Amino acid sequence: MKKFMRYCSVALCLGAALLFGSTCFAQTTFPFLAAGSSGAFNATAIGGAIGATPAICTNTPNNSNLALATNVYIFSQTGKSGHQYFQALDARGTLDAQNALGWIEWSGSADGTTLNSVCLYLSVDSIVGQRLYFATNSGGMPAASINFPGGCSYSTPIPGDNQVPLFPPDTGLPATVCAALQGKAFNAAPTDIRAEDAAFGTARACGAYSATGTGFGYSCTLPTPTEIHSGVGGSTKQVQAVNYAIAGTDPLTGGIVAHTAAGSDGHPFVSLSAGGQAVLVLVNTHDTSSDGFGTTGTFNNINRPDLAHVYVGGATRTREVIGGSGLGSKGMTVLVREPLSGTFNVFEFQVPRVKEFFNTQEDLTNSAGVISANGIGMATPSGWVWEGGSVSGSVTGNPLDWKKTSTGGLKVRVIGTGEMVATLASNSSTDAAGNSLTNQIGYAFFSFGNVKPALGLAKYLTVDGVDPLFDGPDGPTDNPGGTGTLPSCSAPCSTAVTLTNIKNGSYPIWNILRVITSGQLGATNSSGACLSGATVCQMVAAMEASYSLIPDLVPISQMQMFRSHQTITVDGKAFAQHNGNKHYTGIAGTSCGFAPVTGAAIQYECGGDVAGARFQIQTDLDQITDTAAELVGLQQ
């Protein structure tokens, strides 16, 4: 079958015309239209303009300093009220629009009268981005698309918000660029977790409530999927729990999932590894008393058992993690992400739900010390009071906003990386009931953009004594700002962090950023080089080159560690466990999307890895040499 996004058959073009406009969706014009992880925001923008020949999204810059380039056209939005110029729509029902930070790049002319290439990125939860990519209508066509709420009938270009570093000031968005993108389907999903893990996480959120944490009890089907609300006072943020599939048929429409061999794309999806990324554990530093998180010298590290105890509601006082003796009883605020977040799932399966503990962030520990999962509709655990207030359509536990009556400790839901970091940095936030949020602890994937709002207001902790951003106290490169100081980047900033302990895997909370895309757009040869026309693959390669300018991630080529993969069955289809370090032949058309040259041996990766045990890549290679078997099925 021909490439769906590049060469359409007559029948497929007719179907596409109904969804996307009067012309077939030409991949040469729209090489990268993505929704996903905030951690990839800067890297994808820069990668779209440099690093590939020719550049993926823009004309090749005429100056090595992007800030001085005159032929790079970019428009960006903050995603805040009054600045929401584009969004994502899932047309499988009356579902919430996805509003977020985003950018658009194009080449041709600044006024859009000539358009050679147009790219777009919308920063949403990883699982939401994958849902937008995989959502399929009853006719078997992609159901999610780009939308400009105000339309494209305007005469004056819309001013941009200058959200991407290194670039010259934004170019106003011409109506022609807006019109070219309106209604287009997403062809890529940058994500903090593999598609198999995201599908598993969605099934878990949508599963019947279980006290063991295997199901959270959200309603994810039409006509009214659950809206998961923030528990922060005054917040209107929410995310809708909506089901989707990565194989077989779409659960909401019955259409064959487009990005499969049997679907309209004609190719299975592929997962392209882009770089290693750290999850930071962050605390507010406003309280500098001896029993506050801002105390220096005595509270810069947290061990995983203590961190897990915090997130299952067992530890609710600051003194329980600061350590020492003679401290007062002071409640802390524990901030938790939504279950449809890639960050939630990485933290979940690498801290509270490791085999050592096997609990969940949705837990509360009652007054008898018994841990039980706080699913939707669960009776209030003894010793806690629900503070969520009256939110339209909510039930007990949504928003997650609980107070431990004996200690004053709070456990509060935040929606999105932006709200997590902003709430961590705030010294005046409250929960839905008006309780002050103090001594906050939370987590977020590191990027200079993600942590910027918290500079000087929060610090990161080492975990198990290991620094995520620098070599550490015994290494050659310590944090120049002092232990826990969040770094800033005046781009380019190649030495602003080292990420040594992500490369060697000794920091315990990390994962690989992937980009999910169509089999053809991510196609590689047996050596791993991008094939001609595989524009999303080329974008990922360009992203890796950009890490030397803004080192948010570790280039995948420099990662020394991997996580053992597990077989995951989703939608009745098993995605077999393969780490990606062993060469296989004759696997074209498999569920994980590789289509090698006939007879060529390729490194084949499949299955989930977010919960995987950490191993040296060389260890797996030697295991394969010695036994022909991979180190699979091993969990952290």
Image (tube, rainbow, N blue to C red):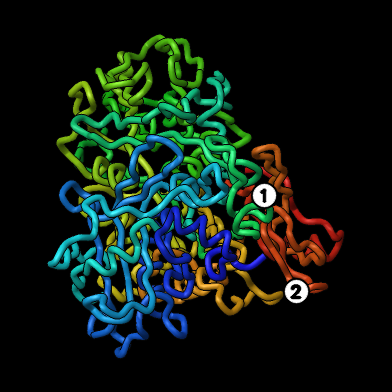
Quadrant where the N terminus is found in the figure: bottom right
Q: Residue furthest left?
A: 156
Quadrant where the C terminus is found in the figure: top right
Disc 1 marks a residue whose amino acid type is Gly
Marks 1/2: CA–CA distance: 22 Å
Residue that appears at 42% across and 53% down:
36
Residue that appears at 42% across and 62% down:
33
- Residue 48 position, x and y percent, is 40, 73
Which image quadrant is residue 256 in?
Answer: top right
In the figure, 460 relative to 544: above or below? Answer: above
Query: Mark 1 near mark 2, Cβ–Cβ under 8 Å?
Result: no
- The residue pinned by badge 2 equals 597
Q: Nearer the viewer, residue 447 or 167?
A: 167
Secondary structure beneath dot 1 equals: loop
Residue that appears at 30% across and 80% down:
114
Disc 2 marks a residue whose amino acid type is Val
Q: Nearer the viewer, residue 45 or 326?
A: 45
Q: Badge 2: few (under 14), some or many (20 or more) residues near its Cα, within 10 Å?
A: some
Q: Which mark is residue 42?
A: none
Q: Badge 1: few (under 14), some or many (20 or more) residues near its Cα, within 10 Å?
A: many
Which image quadrant is residue 163 in?
Answer: bottom left
In the figure, 169 relative to 415: above or below? Answer: below
- Residue 433 position, x and y percent, is 21, 21
Secondary structure beneath dot 2 equals: loop
- The residue pinned by badge 1 equals 607
- Residue 278 position, x and y percent, is 45, 55
